[in-house]
Amino acid sequence: MSPALLFSFVIGYFVLLLVVAYFTSRNSNNESFFIGNRNSNWMLVAFGMIGTSLSGVTFVSVPGAVGIDAFTYFQIVIGYLLGYFVVAYVLLPLYYKLNLTSIYNYLQTRLGLVSYKTGASFFILSRSLGATARLYLVVNILQEAILSGFGIPFWLTTLIILLMILLYTFEGGVKTIVWTDTLQTTCMLVGLVICVFYILSSLHLNISDGIKAIEARGFTRMWVFDPNSKLFFLKQLIAGAFITITMTGLDQEMMQKNISVRTLKDSQKNMITFSVIQAVVVLLFLFLGGLLYLFASSNGVGVAGDKLFPEVALKHMPPVISIVFIVALISALFPSADGAITALTSSFCIDLLGLKRREDWPEKKRKRVRQVVHISFAFLFLLFVMIFKWVNSPSMIGVILKVAAYTYGPLLGLFAFGILTKRSVHDKWVPVVAVASPAICFFIDKFQKQLFGNFEIGLELLIINGLLTFLGLLLLSKRKADGAYLIH
């Protein structure tokens, strides 16, 4: 497949995004950028969030992991469903009641200014690392498939893509992203369905035969009942629920789209609808993974993991399917990167700079500050992508979930303490607890063999991290009634 032809489709797709951005960003202001003037349609938000939550990692890593872990990833997805109900009926009512622009304002109201800044800082760190890990995976595929043929280095490829994202999010922010994510999710899902049916056709199978053939290879194994395994179903279900609560409910990127919806009831409908659609889509990705391994086996393709889908789509399928793959891949790339940069800009401006509180600043000055921060995060993304290029992990989905376990744990502990207790904390010591908890988790993870023998800790490290933060805050807390600290 000609790199020039593939690149022309990438450019055409980007031009389409610019057209959408032009019409959605007219007459926009900071309120449009941060929360879309609280006027987003819940159905568009629900559908567009599919692209944001799945990203290029799901598009490539989930099918690639089927060869090793079969369908066991779906255990986590079922846990996700449980977590989305908590987000919809515990966290969203809280955010709407307080009329929040940044969800971390809750921490200031409940615990104090330092707790608020700590929570926002951990979000910025976590989302920066997670989003750039996702970005790296897709950029690397585009680099190898297209741009290396033009002699363009990897860093320049990354810079070009980030500049593309900046161009269509610079003015409209969330208001634009709600619409571009809808377009991109549509392209991603259409591409997924086309690839599934092409592989079925090339293997002379219908859907029922495809399921049977995958089952015969052992790829449909979904449940693990060994309590010592890190894939034990109870561990995965609980971890999946807490991953959703933290990576969606305590994440400004995901929540700023939800709180941009007109009413709480519509936002809850959005969340539940999105969760069901996401589960169905992930199951389809797993089915695709099984088909890819069948196709690779029958066509002598010798790669696996993250490289399998790109290898099959770009080198062993007709040109039209290669084009579909590239369009679907960049459709998976942009929603996770554009939303992350926008959310990070929002959080940094509102939570760390206090932009909304600076009433003495004219709107023009506040907008200029927001734009400088937006550009700065794009260049920070470039730096982090280059670090992930150096690390070069064979499975980025594992890296992303591990990063989440360390960086979202303190957020889980902070919000849980605020919601589940009536106690107040010694605010200035909160950052110490928030840093100490993931540090302890690092040693637990590193020496778990010596500590627990054959019992493996997997994604539940996130829960341990949150619990350590919660206990640390409890030790530093006082009863509101008597005001006496338990520890001074």
Image: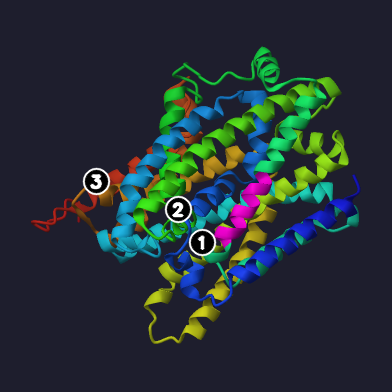
C-alpha gap between disc 3 and disc 2: 19 Å
- Residue bearing the label numbered 3: 420
Q: Is residue 313 above or below residue 148?
A: above
C-alpha gap between disc 1 and disc 3: 27 Å
- Residue 407 seen in render: yes
In the foreground, 68 or 292: 292
Residue drawn at (81%, 40%) of the image: 321
- Residue bearing the label numbered 2: 251
First along the sequence among labels 3 and 2? 2
Q: Main secondary structure of the magenta part?
A: helix
First along the sequence among labels 1 and 3? 1
Q: Amino acid at mark 2?
A: Asp
Residue 183 coordinates in the image, percent (x, y) = 64, 54
Locate the C terminus and report the quarter of the image it occupies.
Answer: bottom left
Q: How many marks?
A: 3
Instruction: Please check the rendered image and state whether residue 180 is part of the magenta-colored stretch, yes or no.
Output: yes
C-alpha gap between disc 2 and disc 1: 9 Å
Mark 2 is surrounded, within 10 Å at the Cα level, by few (under 14), some (14 to 19) or many (20 or more) other residues, namely many
First along the sequence among labels 2 and 1? 2
| Mark 2 vs 1: CB contact within 8 A | yes
Residue 2 coordinates in the image, percent (x, y) = 91, 48
Q: Amino acid at mark 3?
A: Leu
In the foreground, 11 or 308: 11
Magenta segment, which residues? 177-188
Q: Which mark is residue 343?
A: 1
